[in-house]
Amino acid sequence: MVSIDLSDKRALVTGSTRGIGRAVAELLARASAKVVITGRDELRAQEVAREIGANLGAETVGLALDMSNADSIKQAYSKVEGLWGGVDILVNNAGITRDKLFLRMSLEDWEEVLRVNLTGTFVITSLAVKGMLKNRWGRIVNISSVVGFTGNVGQVNYASTKSGLLGFTKSLAKELATRNITVNMVAPGFIETDMTAVLSEDLRQEYLKNIPLGRFGKPEDVAGAVLFLCSEYASYITGEVLHVNGGMY
């Protein structure tokens, strides 16, 4: 049986106390990577880290990380460096929404989403890349969204950030390729998470009509794509987008 072994790798997953982020963290831990679980609530991050560590016999740690605050990001990463000397794998999963029709969207609604989804990603990546450059090995996976490619009513701010990650991914991939660091993006469709749980039944049925596989995805569907991109099986893939959306785009 072919397997993926990340036993010599250290990973950090932003926004990993629930949903897609947690599924990614669990799968990386199952592949024997050391994993940093992060979220705004430190106690929750520590609890999830303990659960994953106990269930999978993995080395995990939970840290507070507010992606809207550069100082919080720097403090968290400093702790990671103190514990493990940095990371080999970075999964930029954390993101927020502030959905409103454009004519009702405030500058604060716009800037808050950009601050977390794009600027936060820039800050944490700039810190993690330094160690990867030194080690001449790294995997960076950015989690985007299908709406970054299709657009979506009421999500001008969110879709702009998820589309912006495409340029970030492709440009950074070109800059880091000579140091054996790959940068790729996974763009999930509609996944069964807290974000989709708030959709009305009518809207859910409307979205399902456009998904050839006839179902919403599961966080594990996205996690599998991320694990692949972090493995040696994807060592010749960089600057690419892997769409995980059941065929809707």
Image (cartoon, rainbow, N blue to C red):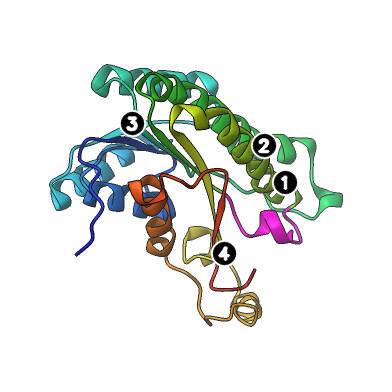
Say whether residue 172 is left or right of residue 233: right
Q: Is residue 86 above or below residue 25?
A: above
Q: Nearer the viewer, residue 77 or 187?
A: 187
Residue at label 2? 114
3D distance between C-alphas at marks 4 and 2: 20 Å
Say whether residue 145 is left or right of residue 33: right
Q: Nearer the viewer, residue 220 or 167?
A: 167
Please report the residue visible at 50 percent of the width from the left and 65 percent of the height from the top: 191
Identity, as a three-letter code, of the amino acid under mark 4: Gly
Q: Earlier in the sequence, mark 2 or mark 1?
A: 2
Which type of secondary structure does the marked residue at label 2 adopt? helix
Pointer 2: residues within 10 angstroms few (<14), some, or many (20+)? many
Residue 63 got which mark? 3
Label pair 2/1, CB-CB below 8 angstroms:
yes
Residue at label 1? 160
Please report the residue visible at 64 percent of the width from the left and 45 percent of the height from the top: 166
Pointer 3: residues within 10 angstroms few (<14), some, or many (20+)? many
Which stretch is magenta? 144-155
Label pair 4/1, CB-CB below 8 angstroms:
no
Which type of secondary structure does the marked residue at label 3 adopt? strand
Q: Earlier in the sequence, mark 4 or mark 1?
A: 1
Say whether residue 168 is left or right of residue 45: right
Residue 6 lies in what quarter of the image? top left
Which type of secondary structure does the marked residue at label 1 adopt? helix
Identity, as a three-letter code, of the amino acid under mark 2: Leu
Name the spot of residue 221 as percent of width and height, x first. Answer: 41, 64
Name the spot of residue 190 as percent of width and height, x first. Answer: 55, 66
Label pair 3/2, CB-CB below 8 angstroms:
no
3D distance between C-alphas at marks 3 and 4: 28 Å
Q: Earlier in the sequence, mark 3 or mark 1?
A: 3
Name the spot of residue 197 as percent of width and height, x first. Answer: 51, 66
